[in-house]
Structure formats: C-alpha cells, structure tokens
Amino acid sequence: MAMFSKLGRFNDFALLVMRVGLGFMMVMHGYPKMLGGPGKWAKLGEAMQHLGITYAPEFWGFMAAFSETVGGGLLILGLVSRPAALLLFFTMLVASLKHLYAGDGLMGASHSIELAVVFLGMTILGPGKYSMDKG
C-alpha cells in the first residue's frame, strides 16, 4: 500500500500531461473547423438538433470549433481550465449524440464519449498545480 501512496505525488504532473496532450489534439481538431467559415459551422451546428435546438446552427457550429480550438489552448496553458473543460465536455456530448443518432452505434461514438468523460473529470479535478490557474 505504501507504494501507491508515493505515486500520489505525481498527480499534478499527470494532470499536466493530460491537459497538454488532450489540449493539443483538440486544437488540431478545432482549428480547421474555425477556418471552415460559416458553411462549415452551419453543418457542425446541425448536431444541436439532437438536443431540440434547431435555430442558429452557424452559431452553435462556431461555438464547437471555438471550444475545441480556444478551449484546447486554454487547457494547454492551464488557464480558466475548468470552464474550458466544461465547454469541451458539452462539445463532446453533442458529438456523441450526433454519432449515436447517425446510427454509428456505441463504438462509432466511443471516441467522443470517452473524451466527454475525461473532460467532465477535468472539470471536477481542475488543472493541478502546474498551471496558470494553480489548481
């Protein structure tokens, strides 16, 4: 049992690794969407219909691209980490619903479901001490 208590000293470093790794990948996914413009945003925003929201798809698509790009960057820095992780959680929740409603099945939606779970956990845990937020 003593070995596991010693591993706890790496918790903040583990959060840093997760924040930087996932944040970078979210920026890589979101940046092309940001550059896609209103046509791309409208297509992305159509996924909100699965929550009963059918108005302003360009706005919702822009918010998804913004969440991935800017939210990912904020996670890397550890700046306003909890709100960024919460936005990313919501974005991945909508992406999960999009896949499920498209008939992709659980395995087709698994990547976005997994990310939603991780971002919810990061919302709860916070960024750790190696961040601009300082935990």
Image (cartoon, rainbow, N blue to C red):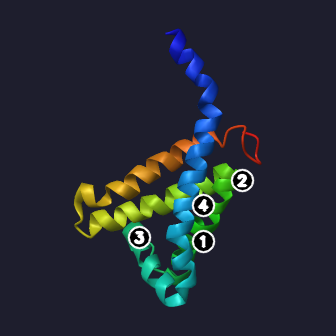
The answer to whether 111 is drawn above or below residue 63 in the figure is: above
User: Which percent across, then down, holds residue 63?
Assistant: 57, 72
Image location of residue 5, percent across then percent down: 57, 16
Circle 1 residues within 10 Å: few <14, some 14–19, many ≥20:
many
Q: Amino acid at mark 2?
A: Val
Q: How many marks?
A: 4
Mark 1 and mark 4: Cα distance apart in space = 9 Å
Q: Secondary structure at mark 3?
A: loop
Label 1 close to label 4 by CB (< 8 Å): no
Q: Amino acid at mark 1?
A: Phe
Labels 1 and 4: the sequence-earlier one: 1
Q: Nearer the viewer, mark 2 or mark 4?
A: 4
Q: Earlier in the sequence, mark 2 or mark 1?
A: 1
Q: Tell me if mark 3 has few (under 14), some (14-19) or many (20+) residues whose alpha carbon lies within 10 angstroms of its own.
A: few
- For the residue marked with disc 4, what is the amino acid? Gly
Vertical placement of residue 30 versus 75, above or below: below
Q: Nearer the viewer, mark 3 or mark 1?
A: 1
The span from disc 3 to disc 2 (Cα, nearest Å) is 29 Å
Residue designated by label 1: 66
Q: Amino acid at mark 3?
A: Gly
Residue 72's disc is 4
User: Between disc 3 and disc 2, whose residue precedes?
Assistant: 3
Q: Residue under circle 2?
A: 80
Q: Which residue is mark 3?
A: 52
